[in-house]
């Protein structure tokens, strides 16, 4: 009986220690970096239009995007990584697209970029949020084939907050 008590105590001891650990919260200033994006948006680009609804969920730990365009349906989830000191985003769409991106501020612009492929490190993609205002911003999808020396615009969207 004494051995059973010792065994149960040994198994339960880590549970008590875990319960006392401080759980990180998502209320730091960095967790507010994408607050400008949260809301319902109308999107217009050359040859198309759509909507994008961005929500902040899970006690501020997650930003969820639901994009509905005339030629593309997709969604993303973004969260701030304390370890990397930057945002991470996963994009998935109905054209079987999947992107893993990292985000950070560069001046007044917010940038998410793909991780360079080891087989072709000079080819990269990035999205740039620029001209960020309370009720509008510009989103630009860009690509490079020379490691970032020159970036070419592939798609640009003008966002205005939906009324």
Image: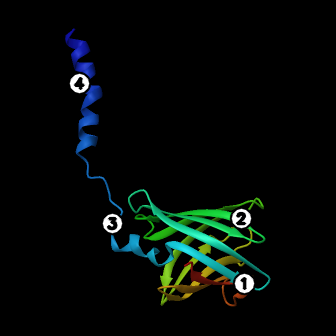
The CA distance from mark 1 to mark 3 is 34 Å
Specify whether residue 148 is in view. yes
**Residue 116 x %, y %:** 65, 71
Q: Which sits earlier in the primary sequence, circle 1 or circle 3?
A: 3
Residue at the spot of label 2: 73
Q: Which sits earlier in the primary sequence, circle 3 or circle 2?
A: 3
Residue at the spot of label 1: 45
Q: Which sits earlier in the primary sequence, circle 2 or circle 1?
A: 1
The CA distance from mark 1 to mark 4 is 63 Å
What residue is at 69 percent from the left and 82 percent from the top?
Answer: 44
Q: Which sits earlier in the primary sequence, circle 4 or circle 3?
A: 4
Number of numbered labels in the structure image:
4
**Mark 2 neighbour density, 10 Å: few (under 14) some (14–19) many (20 or more):** some
What residue is at 42 percent from the left and 64 percent from the top?
Answer: 83
Query: Mark 3 and mark 4 in contact (Cβ < 8 Å)?
Result: no
Query: Residue placed farthest to the top in the image?
Result: 1
The CA distance from mark 4 to mark 3 is 36 Å
Query: Mark 1 and mark 2 in contact (Cβ < 8 Å)?
Result: no
Residue at the spot of label 3: 27
Residue at the spot of label 4: 9
**Residue 150 x %, y %:** 70, 90
């Amino acid at each position: 009986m004494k051995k059973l008590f010792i065994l149960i105590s040994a198994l339960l001891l880590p549970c008590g220690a875990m319960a006392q650990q401080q759980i990180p919260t998502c209320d730091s200033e960095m967790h507010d970096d994408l607050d400008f994006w949260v809301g319902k948006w109308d999107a217009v680009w050359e040859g198309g239009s759509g909507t994008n609804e961005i929500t902040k969920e899970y006690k501020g730990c997650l930003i969820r995007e639901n994009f509905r365009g005339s030629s593309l349906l997709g969604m993303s989830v973004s969260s701030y990584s304390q370890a990397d000191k930057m945002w991470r985003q996963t994009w998935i769409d109905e054209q079987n697209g999947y992107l893993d991106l990292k985000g950070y501020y560069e001046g007044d612009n917010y940038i998410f970029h793909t991780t360079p492929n080891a087989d072709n490190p000079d080819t990269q993609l990035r999205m740039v949020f620029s001209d960020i205002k309370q009720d509008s911003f510009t989103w630009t999808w860009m690509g490079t084939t020379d490691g970032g020396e020159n970036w070419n615009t592939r798609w640009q969207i003008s966002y205005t907050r939906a009324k």
